[in-house]
Image (cartoon, coloured by chain):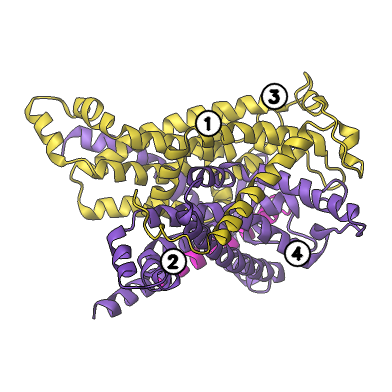
Chain colours: A purple, B yellow
Amino acid sequence: MSPFKVLSLLPLLLVLVMLVAFPIGQMIWMSFGNVRLTAGELIWDSAGLANYERMLGDETFRISLWNSLVFIFFTVVITVVLGIALALAADRLVRGQKLVQNVLLWPAIVAPVVISVAWLLILSPQVGLVNKILRSLGASPQSWLGDPFGAMASVVVIDVWHWTPIVFLLIYTALRSLDPSVLEAARIDGANYVATVRYIVLPLLTPAILGAVAIRVLMGVKVFDEMYLLTFGGPGTATTVISIYLRSVFFESFQYGFGSALSVTVVVLVLVALLVALAVRSLIRGVRRA
Amino acid sequence: MPDAIHRNHQGSWLVRILLTGAVVSTILPILWLLLIAFQRPRAIISPGWTFEFSLANFEEVFGPRQVYGAQVVNSVILVLVSTAITLVIAAFAAYSLSQLHWSRRTVASILGGAGLLQVIPPVTLVPGLFATLQTLGLNGTLSGLILLNTVFNLPFAVILIKFYFDTLPTELRESAAIDGASEFATFRRIMLPLAAPGIASVAIFTAIQVWNEFLFGLVFTTGGREAPITVGIATLIQPQEIKFGPMAAVGAVTAVPIIILAIVANRHIVAGLTRGAVKG
């Protein structure tokens, strides 16, 4: 084995061990202990399974898991459906495809923090654009972010605005790379547009669509910035998703052991979901081949 | 590009309405942010529709006693250094994994380990990372943030650059070796330039990710002079009082460079986003 072969890979391995394997090990270790931060040092005392037992009875953790599920379900379904619709539409444009693609890239790359600020300026009861319009029309101003249902609906709408473009870009790129002769053949056979899309285009796009769904689900699991800035998880626990709850356990109540037990559980849940998804995929492939 | 299902114009008014709606609703919140940023402070809270141009918000946040200027500088340093380190480590590792005949199992387990980092929520690793940074003496420093940003962008960069190296024929490397070039020279002079377009996409994508990063900046700094600008924006949003004008001004400063980049380097960014997403 040549030295270059080893040396070229070494920095990556070093970083992965130091900042991935080690923190994960720490997380598991802490989840079995009472951990206090004293004079900048983490002090660990064994707690056995106490953190996990407490987790099972923790109401807020259950609520945060449920909130994350609700958030993921609605944002994934809406962004994927809208993204497909926009991609099919842009594909039919005679002019302006470049413009659409360019503008729709903006939300996907502007900082989530700035997106949150922009929407705060739209939804705020004092200075918000929506309330300015309502007031001009003679209606009374609303406080969406102050109402449990309104707050969840708002963060879903913002997430849809934010991430539909990424689904659009994924599907649109896949759509543009389809072999036109297949579609030409369908048209010669007399298939109309809707039938072509339903029976030929969508099946061909399935890998891209499933890829988009997977990415969106993972983004939904990780979501943090928008809730932190717009609702702070509230009102009450209405928009407390997993990441928001974990941050408050770590940095407001400083319960590193308990927080680590929650973290381990979240990571395990994500990995199990991922394995199930992969298993289902290979099962479906197997059935198709048989 | 062929017209795919495209030459069929039936129902095109629906197409135009849908896309015009998408473009307008995408631009509107960003435009409103810019308007508020340049709006005279007392006009912001007035219920009417007057617009009075003013630079007061910018003067307030970038005045001599404020931290936001320093935070913009921090973010720029963070982007330059993290992106550079990420690219160097990733280019070597991707080349090694792609071209230097590691066993399949080795490649799979390294990519798997890297991929693991892509799927778990970063906040779960915060206590472990805190302990790690504490050991290294980097808690609360810009160097600590550079390290974290590098690590969390490496998996994507390695996977994507490897994908570009995979498209190069192995014979290229072998013939260079026969000509007597050293392994490093082969990498540096022959293979790396060929992967340059791919690496450029990764560079832009990584830089955007680092510029936008918020969570680590929030929990690993105290939000003052050593924090990145995304954290600075958050300090303007307090439960008791939201400083709308300054918040919009800092938001505009953070967003406008990225939007200009989107217009100028559109193709590179789309390539990075879509390929990376599908392969990762």
Of the residues tagged 1 and 4, which is closer to the observer? 1
Q: Check the residue under mark 4 and report the chain it is in.
A: A
Q: Is residue A201 left or right of residue B205?
A: left
Tell me how far mark 1 sits from mark 2, CA to CA. 31 Å
Q: Quadrant of residue A245?
A: bottom right
* Residue type, mark 4 in image: Thr
Of residues A214 and A160, the one nearer the viewer is A160
Tell me how far mark 2 sits from mark 4, CA to CA. 27 Å
Check residue B259 for magenta coloring: no
Q: Check the residue under mark 1 and report the chain it is in.
A: B
Q: Which residue is mark 4?
A: A237
The count of marks equals: 4
| SS of the residue under disc 4 | loop
Q: Magenta residues, as a range?
A: A247-276
* Residue type, mark 3 in image: Gly
Among the two numbered marks 1 and 3 on one chain, the one whose residue lies closer to the N terminus: 3
* Residue type, mark 1 in image: Val
Q: Do tags 1 and 3 sit on the same chain?
A: yes
* Image location (x, y in percent) of residue B203: 43, 34
* Image location (x, y in percent) of residue B136: 51, 35
Check residue A256 for magenta coloring: yes
Of residues B138 and B143, the one nearer the viewer is B143
Q: Quadrant of residue B138?
A: top right
Q: Which residue is mark 2?
A: A274
Of the residues tagged 4 and 3, which is closer to the observer? 3
Residue A34 seen: no
Q: Check the residue under mark 2 and report the chain it is in.
A: A
| SS of the residue under disc 2 | helix
